[in-house]
Image: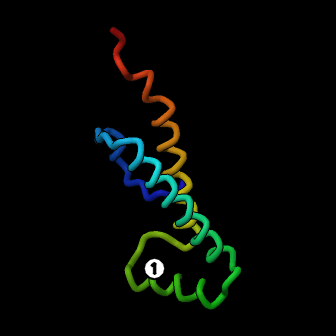
């Protein structure tokens, strides 16, 4: 897992609701972000990869370029699982 996880935070839960259009937009944005950052992390543009790494360092980010590339994909997968599991949480009549 490349998302930053802090020990002891497993018990925390947040419940939010977003409409399907916003969820789709978030998933599309994260997919594009994943493609962009993965390309940088893969070294397809060495100068841009060095600059992105420097920006993360300047921001004191806990992410490396490679872990940041994986984080949007993981988030999209979580959203997709939540989307597919949501109908089972709707009470019947």
The residue lying toward the viewer, choosing from 60 and 92, is 92
The residue located at (44%, 24%) in the rendering is 87
Looking at the image, the residue that sits furthest to the front is 21
Q: x%, y% of residue 83?
A: 47, 36
Q: x%, y% of residue 2?
A: 53, 58
Residue 81 visible in the current orientation: yes
Q: Secondary structure at mark 1?
A: helix
Residue 51 in the image: above or below residue 10: below
Residue 41 in the image: above or below residue 18: below
The residue located at (31%, 40%) in the rendering is 17
Q: x%, y% of residue 55?
A: 45, 84
Residue 2 visible in the current orientation: no
The residue lying toward the viewer, choosing from 24 and 42, is 24
Looking at the image, the residue that sits furthest to the bottom is 47
**Dot 1, how many residues are within 10 Å of its Cα: few (below 14), some (14-19), or many (20+)?**
some
Left or right: 88 in relation to 49: left
Determine which residue is flagged by label 1.
56
The residue located at (56%, 59%) in the rendering is 31
The residue lying toward the viewer, choosing from 52 and 32, is 32
The residue lying toward the viewer, choosing from 20 and 70, is 20
Number of labels in the image equals: 1
Quadrant where the C terminus is found in the figure: top left
Residue 81 in the image: above or below residue 22: above
The residue located at (48%, 29%) in the rendering is 85
Residue 93 in the image: above or below residue 34: above
Specify how the rendered protein is coloured. rainbow
Looking at the image, the residue that sits furthest to the top is 93
């Amino acid at each position: 897992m490349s998302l930053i996880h802090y020990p002891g935070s497993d018990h925390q839960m947040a419940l939010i609701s977003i409409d399907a259009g916003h969820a789709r937009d978030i998933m599309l944005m994260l997919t594009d972000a994943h493609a962009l950052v993965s390309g940088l992390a893969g070294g397809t543009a060495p100068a841009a990869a060095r600059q992105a790494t420097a920006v993360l360092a300047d921001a004191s980010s806990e992410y490396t370029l490679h872990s940041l590339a994986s984080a949007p994909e993981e988030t999209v997968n979580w959203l997709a699982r939540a989307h597919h599991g949501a109908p089972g949480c709707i009470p019947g009549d």
